[in-house]
Structures are given as structure tokens and as C-alpha cells.
Amino acid sequence: MNCKYCQKSIGLLRSLKDRDYCSDAHKAAATTSSARVLRELGELDYSTVDSRDASSEVVEPTKQPPSNVSSTATVLILLALGGVLILSLDSQGGGASGAPETAERRPTWISHQTSSLLSHLPRISAGTELRSDFVSSNLRDWQAAAASASSGWNINNGLLRPGGLRIWSDSKKLADYRFQFEGRIENTSVNWAIRAGDHRNYYATKLMLSGRGDSHTTELVRFSMIGGKETRRVRLPLPLTLDDKAFYQYEIRALSDRFVTIVGGRVIDIFHDPRLRSGGVGFFSEGSERSSIRWAKVTVGEDFVDKLRGFLTFGLILPPME
């Protein structure tokens, strides 16, 4: 048994107490590391499995751009909330006066002011979602390399079984996104690619199962394909037990030079690599590897202002934003 944090062997006495970590310090360090990542993601409901980047080649992370939502925006949000509360009280007062309701509700002065405040909030690119449920055998949206047009892909009973790498055409020009899919390992591994601008440049990941039943082990293998040459192959043993007959939800988040992999609601891998700044998603299999994919989707950005408007102005009539 190896420590999930430092990968060193766990002593016999220690293994009687903890089969995952060689010391309390390493257990705490792993938990802290994962919790920090989840705080940054803003989703502390995830459980975590920390995996260290074992690459022998260290990639220096680039500085992250400042948050789009500044302190000024926070003040505006608070003001908007205040406007909502005032309008709510005003509406209650109006109802008490017994004035008849008009057939057409119009924005009040407070509504106009609240809308004006919201219009000054910074906007993030509008939310976009690509989705494929593989209900037909048409693979025109998935681009194969020119030399392998018949790359072994097939769709049967709503399940995709990938062969050679294909890239989702509509995603090729994207940069930051959330890639999600539901898949099952049928033999050895399920494999995917992100930031794939073409078939010579992408980041690849394999989630692999070895052995059978209770004795099987799980590991994550990832590598980079840059200019058609493989670099930085990393193998990470995972303290994760997967049923090789079950479907799991996979999620990969790409943000600038930072990538987070989540399987079944557990963070299993985090790494940084600044070399590929844009590119889409894809699936592939090699050799005897086989997997089934039930659906896949890519979500790009969210319209922060529209979400905020919906949350803060429930029940209010606001004029349209220009």
C-alpha cells in the first residue's frame, strides 16, 4: 500500500490505522489541498481525492487574470438588493391602499433604478451549451484525422464507442469550458482529449482499470500531444474504486492554464499547463481499450448579469437592459 499523498509505502503499524496515508500530516495536507481547490471552484459539496502532479517536468503556472467581478460590482449588487427590498415594501404598501391592479404591470421608478445598477455589472460571455446524446449514427460533428476517416467509431442503442481520436467540431475554437459526459469502461480505460485544436495538439487523459472485481486498481494516465509528439506522460494511482459495469459522470474544467478532473463528484486530478490556450474536446481508444459514452456536453461561460437579475428581481418587472 502506498500513501495517496507522497506515494511512499505505508508501514505495517500505520496501515492498521490508515490504509491511505503514511502519516496524519500527509492526510491533512491532501485534504487541505483539495479543499483549497474546491473553494476556488466555489463548490464545496464535492468530496475530494487529491492527486499530485508526478511529472518530472515542472510547468510554471501563469498568473491568473483578475476576477471579472470587482469590488465595485459587489457594491452594485448590494445596492440592487436594497432596491429590491424597498420595492417589495413599496408593493406591499400599495396593496394595502386598495388600489385596483391594472391589466398590464409596468416597471416602477425603483425597478428602473435597479435595472440601471445591474446594467453596470461586468458581463461574462453569454452561456453556451453543446450537447450530444448519440441517438443517431451520424458522426458528422466529430472530426477524424484525414488519414483515418473510418476510425472505428460506432453508435449502437444510444451508446458511442470511440475508436481513433475524433474532435467535436463545434468545440474546436473554444478556450475555457466545462466538459461533461457519462461513460463506462468496458475494457481497460475510458479516454478523452481537451484543448484539441487539431489531431496533433491536445491534452489526453485515460482513466484505467487493472484487475477484476475487488482486486482491481484505478489509475489516471495523462499526456500532452504537441506538434504530433507525445510529452509529459504522467501515471497517477488513485484511491478510487470504480465498478467496471457502471456508468459514471465525468467532468473536466479548463480555465486558462488550469485543469480539474472530477469523476463521480470527486476531484481526482489537478494540473497546470500553459502551452495550449484553446481547442475543443474529443474521445479516443487505443489498442484493446473500449468504453461506452451515453452523452456529452460542453458548457462555455455563464451570463452572470442575467443570473443575478433572475435571483435579485424575483417577482419584479424590470425594463429590458440596453
Image (cartoon, helix red, strand yellow):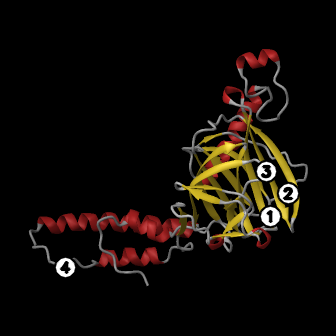
Badge 2 element:
loop
> For the residues marked 4 and 2, what is the alpha-carbon distance in whole angstroms?
60 Å
Q: Are marks 1 and 2 in contact (CB under 8 Å)?
A: yes
Badge 3 element:
loop
Q: Residue furthest bottom?
A: 322
> For the residues marked 4 and 1, what is the alpha-carbon distance in whole angstroms?
54 Å
Across and down, in percent, residue 196 comes to 74, 67
In this figure, what is the number of numbered marks?
A: 4
Across and down, in percent, residue 131 comes to 54, 64
User: Could you tell me which residue is drawn at 87 percent across and 59 percent down?
Assistant: 230
Q: Nearer the viewer, mark 4 or mark 1?
A: 1
Q: Label 2 is placed on what type of residue?
A: Val
Q: Earlier in the sequence, mark 4 or mark 2?
A: 2
Q: Nearer the viewer, mark 1 or mark 3?
A: 3
Q: Are marks 4 and 1 in contact (CB under 8 Å)?
A: no
The residue labelled by disc 1 is: 274
Q: Is residue 62 above or below residue 240?
A: below
Image quadrant where one finds the C terminus: bottom left
Choose between 321 and 255: the one closer to the eye. 255
Choose between 79 and 316: the one closer to the eye. 316
Badge 4 element:
loop
Choose between 148 and 242: the one closer to the eye. 148
Name the quadrant containing residue 27: top right
Q: Earlier in the sequence, mark 3 or mark 4?
A: 4
Q: Earlier in the sequence, mark 1 or mark 2?
A: 2
Q: Nearer the viewer, mark 3 or mark 4?
A: 3
The residue labelled by disc 4 is: 104
Q: Earlier in the sequence, mark 1 or mark 3?
A: 1
The residue labelled by disc 3 is: 287
Q: Earlier in the sequence, mark 4 or mark 1?
A: 4
The residue labelled by disc 2 is: 59
- For disc 4, the neighbor class at 10 Å (few under 14, some 14 to 19, many from 20) is few
